[in-house]
Image (cartoon, rainbow, N blue to C red):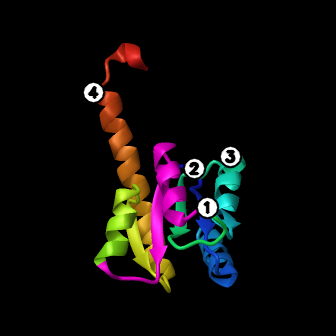
């Protein structure tokens, strides 16, 4: 299996940089962004498999909006938030996020979440390919 490519976006630079460093030690390829606009710009050249996005980002483009756009492009968005209430979870779910993690995130939990959402994406793709007529390939 190829290396998983993960874009991490959080306005808290230390948190984003630390998460990227720890994921790199586990074999992931990571790019860090600190705003929604940076995340959208980075996606064009980096082409991540998944994105770990803080929901509340400054600079005009929210993490929820970035996640919605990424989900539409086939990138698996994972929400990262300091809020545990249902309204935030619902906002993330409505935007297409596949998981919701609370800050501060435990690296083992983040790693397991990335592995599981990518596995589900692969399984979903395999099922769609198996159901499609062979001429669609």
The numbered mark, 2 or 3, whose residue comes first in the sequence reads 2
* Left or right: 115 as drawn, with respect to 20: left
Residue under label 3, please give it: 44
Task: State how far apart marks 2 and 1 are (Cα).
Answer: 16 Å
Residue 100: % across, % down? 39, 71
Which mark identifies residue 85? none
The picture quadrant where one finds residue 84 is bottom left
Residue at x 37% of width, y 73% of height? 88
The numbered mark, 2 or 1, whose residue comes first in the sequence reads 2
Which residue reaches farthest front? Answer: 60
Q: Tell me the element at label 4.
A: helix
Q: Tell me the element at label 3.
A: helix
Q: Residues within 10 Å of mark 3 (few under 14, many from 20)?
A: few
Tag in front: 3 or 4: 3
Residue under label 2, please give it: 2
Residue under label 1, please give it: 7
């Amino acid at each position: 299996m190829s290396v998983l490519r993960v874009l991490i976006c959080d306005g808290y630079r230390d948190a984003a940089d630390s998460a990227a460093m720890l994921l790199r030690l586990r074999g992931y390829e990571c790019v860090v962004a600190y705003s929604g606009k940076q995340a959208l710009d980075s996606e064009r050249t980096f082409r991540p498999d998944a994105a770990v996005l803080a929901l509340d980002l400054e600079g005009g483009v929210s993490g929820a909006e970035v996640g919605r756009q990424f989900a539409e492009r086939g990138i698996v968005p994972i929400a990262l938030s300091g809020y545990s209430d249902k309204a935030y979870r619902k906002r993330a779910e409505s935007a297409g996020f596949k998981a919701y993690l609370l800050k501060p995130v435990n690296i083992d939990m983040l790693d397991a979440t990335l592995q599981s959402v990518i596995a589900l994406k692969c399984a979903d793709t395999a099922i769609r390919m198996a159901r499609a007529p062979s001429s669609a390939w």
